[in-house]
Amino acid sequence: MKKILLVVLALILISCSQKKSAQDYFNKGVQLIEKGEIDKSIECYQQGLKLEPKSAVGNNLLGMAYRSKFNQTGDSEWKKKEIASFEAALEINPDYMNALVNLGTTYYYSGEKKKAVPYFKHALEVYPEHPEAEQIKKMIAEVEE
C-alpha cells in the first residue's frame, strides 16, 4: 500500500512540475518568432493568454506576431488581429508603453497617421526617455503641421 501511495505521489509531483505558466509560453513564443516560426509563436502566445488572459505583455507579443504574419502574407485579417491585440493590451494597462508605441506605429505606417498621434503622445508622457523619442516626436510633428 505504501508503494502505491509513493507512486501516486510521485506522479502528482511530476505532473505539477510539468505545468507551464503563461510566462513560459510567452518566452517560448519570443524564441520561436526570433527563429522566424511565426505560426508556432502565435500558438504559444495564445496558449499563454488562455492561462493569463489579462496579460498586457502577452497581448502585445501576440500583436507583434500578428504584425509579422501580416508582413509575411499581406492579408488584412492579420492587420485587424494585430490592432485588436494591441488594443486588448491597452485595455488591460492603458499606460503600457510598448503597446502604445506599437499601436501608434501600426496606424502610422497603415496611413492612418492622425490615429497614431494620441498613442505616440501618451507613450512619451509615460516614458519621456524612450530610446526612439526623437523619431516619435518627428512622426507627431509631421501629422500636426
Image (tube, rainbow, N blue to C red):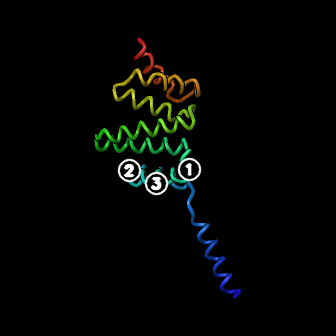
Q: Quadrant of the C terminus?
A: top left
Specify few, some or many for label 2: CA neighbours under 10 Å numbering under 14, 14-19, or 20 or more: many
User: Mark 2 and mark 1: span between their CA atoms?
Assistant: 21 Å
According to the image, label 3 marks what residue?
44
Q: Earlier in the sequence, mark 3 or mark 1?
A: 3
User: Mark 2 and mark 3: span between their CA atoms?
Assistant: 10 Å
Q: Nearer the viewer, mark 3 or mark 1?
A: 1
Q: Can residue 36 be seen in this snapshot?
A: no
Q: Amino acid at mark 1?
A: Glu
Q: Is residue 72 above or below residue 15?
A: above
Q: Amino acid at mark 3?
A: Cys
Could you tell me which secondary element the residue under label 2 belongs to?
Answer: helix
The residue sitting at 71% across, 86% down in the picture is 2
Residue 33 % position (x, y): 42, 49
Residue 136 % position (x, y): 47, 24
Q: Is residue 75 above or below residue 17?
A: above
According to the image, label 1 marks what residue?
52
In this image, 54 relative to 116: left or right? right
Q: In the rendering, which numbered label is found on residue 38?
A: 2
User: Mark 3 and mark 1: span between their CA atoms?
Assistant: 12 Å
Q: Amino acid at mark 2?
A: Ile
Q: Is residue 62 above or below residue 126?
A: below
Q: Earlier in the sequence, mark 2 or mark 3?
A: 2
Q: Nearer the viewer, mark 2 or mark 1?
A: 1
